Image: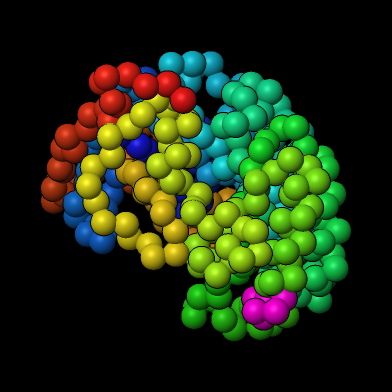
Amino acid sequence: MIAYASMRTDIPAFYSDWLMRRIEEGFVMVRSPYNDHLIYKLPFNPEVIDCLGFCTKDPGRMIPRLGAFKEWKTLWHVTITPYGKEYEPGVRDKREIVSAFKNLSLRVGKDKVVWRYDPVFLSPLFSISSHKTWFSTLSSLLEGYTDRVIFSFLDIYPFLKDNMKSLGIRAPEKSEMEDLASFFVEEGKRHGLVVSSCAEGRWMNALGVDTSGCLTREVWEKCAEKKLNFPNKKNKRGECDCILGFDIGGYGGCGMKCVYCYGRNYERHEIHNPLSPLLFGWPRKEDEIKEVKAESWADRDGWLL
């Protein structure tokens, strides 16, 4: 099976102690986002998890602990944007993040580390021109350390609308999206990068953008280094071909506190305990715990990429 830690909570940056505990104990519990009294319990070991995916804005704290993953196949999506503390107050200096990205790439391989340049928005501090300059600069810095960059444009959720307006933040218009996407593709070619979009729709194919998705069958099999027999499940998204595995993350608790993020509330951090099998809080007596039957999806006939 596939497991991943989504950007809803940046586990590598803030909860690595908890993650190490989960590896040591061999199981993880995840509270359902749809039913507060339902908890899923699944095995957490490389025998049943074919690939473990991480999404993070700062992999630096995990690098000293990579030895714990020597038996695992991992995939890392690392977000590096040009925004400063006024938009991303909890993110370290971007030069340090770039350095950590390179270090991670050297440790796990550049094909296992993906650069994310998202979300892209416009504001008084970030114009079309400045995005082009920054994308070019970061592409140059990361050249040779990854072979893929994923971008997306900002989605403004209703409860963030007033805050975005007060900060002068807006999503690009269609013509501006086309301009930026075309530039990203051309600049990506210069630096050996496949340029992909995240859930922006198939219309970008005409611009040379890979719109297949961030976590496709091909991506997971490349991570696992073997052919996988995925369960027959209907794709939840019409904009891409992503195969979403079991998410061990949870809403809230991310210390990055990015002003544009739908999951930026940090209050849940207060109920985090590295000893708990849950990322936030502890199982309660009224909770139903459902065992997840997890097994490897590896093709037993054997097949190497």
**Range of the magenta residues?**
170-176
Q: Residue at x 59, y 83 (%)?
A: 162
- Which residue shows up at 65% across the image and 46% down it? 194
Q: Nearer the viewer, residue 122 or 158?
A: 122
Vertical position of residue 290 compared to residue 239: above or below: above
Q: Which quadrant would residue 109 be assigned to in this image?
A: top right
Count of marks overlaid on the render: 0
Residue 173 magenta-drawn?
Answer: yes
Q: Quadrant of the N terminus?
A: top left
Q: Position of residue 31 (x, y in %)?
A: 28, 49
In the picture, measured across the screen, residue 204 lies left or right of residue 17, that is: right
**Rendered position, 32 above or below 192:** below
x, y (%) of residue 27?
28, 29
Q: Outermost residue toward the front?
A: 206
Colouring of the image = rainbow
Q: Is 263 colored magenta in this rendering?
A: no
Give the residue drawn at x 69%, y 49%: 80
Query: Between 119 and 200, which is closer to the camera in this rendering?
Result: 200
Q: Mark yes or no: residue 64 visible.
A: yes
Instruction: Tell me: residue 137, above or below residue 109.
Output: below
140 to 255, vertically: above or below: above
For this rendering, which residue is in front, 62 or 74? 74
Whole-percent x and y of residue 238?
Answer: 39, 65
